[in-house]
Image: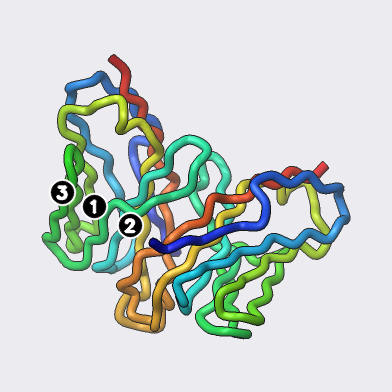
């Protein structure tokens, strides 16, 4: 079974703090994704990565950065957290390479509250 | 603009009834995915539809894809309480190109099945 884990289920941070969200997958998947989920808006792609050290902006990258130093790990960084970044963050991975046929497997999510 | 729209967004059903969730998308694609999300949980894959006319069935759920109409449907037959969840469709708009499996999600349909 594919397993995607996220470092925290719940986080509370203060405005201006630097926040790290970590995601690890155990199936040697090439593609990894970070989404945020907000009511009525579905899932919106923040960043994705198709290989180690490779990253691409998604639909809403502003205020976020990512890091992929190892194939199994994809980190989302909020450089200076703001209240409008309060959301559910979901990490996903898929097999690759670039065929577009792969199902994405999701982690359990991190619910972030920025005060 | 790449858009995926679901309707209805909220669906309250009686057990034993049938209903359909619709997923419309804005630009040509022949790769469409359906996911289910239980409250407080992450997304799990339900169906992958890869060509015009594709139909997949699992239990009381059946999904179909009409690429000419840019429409997918998720049909629920004789609903039971266990089907209560949020259902998302997602489209790969770059299928056949360098998509890296990137998906655009609909807003989600919250389904509640009651006795």
| Colour option used | rainbow
Q: Secondary structure at mark 2?
A: strand
Q: Residue at x 71, y 51 (%)?
A: A85
Q: Alpha-carbon neighbours of circle 2 within 10 Å: few (<14), some, or many (≥20)?
A: many
Q: Secondary structure at mark 3?
A: strand
Q: Are marks 3 and 2 in contact (CB under 8 Å)?
A: no
| Residue mark closest to the camera, 3 vs 1 | 3
Rendered location of residue A27, percent (x, y): 45, 72
Q: Residue at x 80, y 65 (%)?
A: A79
Q: Give residue B69's quadrant in the image.
A: bottom left
Question: What chain does mark 3 sit on?
Answer: B
For the C terminus of chain B, the quadrant is top left
Rendered location of residue B88, percent (x, y): 38, 48
Q: Are marks 1 and 2 in contact (CB under 8 Å)?
A: yes
Q: Alpha-carbon neighbours of circle 1 within 10 Å: few (<14), some, or many (≥20)?
A: many
Q: Nearer the viewer, residue A23 or B4?
A: A23
Q: Which mark is residue B25?
A: 2
Question: What chain does mark 1 sit on?
Answer: B
């Amino acid at each position: 079974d594919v397993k995607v884990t996220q470092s925290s289920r719940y986080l509370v941070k203060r405005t201006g703090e630097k926040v790290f969200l970590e995601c690890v997958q155990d199936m040697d998947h090439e593609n990894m994704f970070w989404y945020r989920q907000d009511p009525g808006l579905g899932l919106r792609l923040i960043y994705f990565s198709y290989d180690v050290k490779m990253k691409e902006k998604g639909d809403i990258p502003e205020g976020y950065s990512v890091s992929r130093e190892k194939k199994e790990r994809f980190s989302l960084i909020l450089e200076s957290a703001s209240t409008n970044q309060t959301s559910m963050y979901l990490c996903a991975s898929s097999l690759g390479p670039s065929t577009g046929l792969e199902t994405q497997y999701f982690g359990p999510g991190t619910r972030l509250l920025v005060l | 603009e790449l858009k995926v729209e679901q309707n209805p967004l909220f669906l309250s059903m009686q057990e034993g009834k049938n209903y359909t969730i619709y997923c419309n998308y804005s630009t040509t694609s022949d790769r469409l995915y359906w996911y289910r999300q239980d409250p407080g949980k992450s997304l799990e894959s339900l169906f992958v539809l890869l060509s015009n006319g594709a139909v997949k069935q699992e239990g009381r759920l059946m999904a179909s894809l009409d690429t000419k109409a840019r429409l997918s449907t998720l049909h629920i037959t004789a609903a039971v309480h266990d089907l209560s969840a949020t259902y998302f469709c997602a489209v790969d708009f770059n299928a056949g190109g360098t998509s890296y499996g990137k998906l655009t999600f609909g807003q989600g349909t919250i389904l509640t099945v009651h006795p």
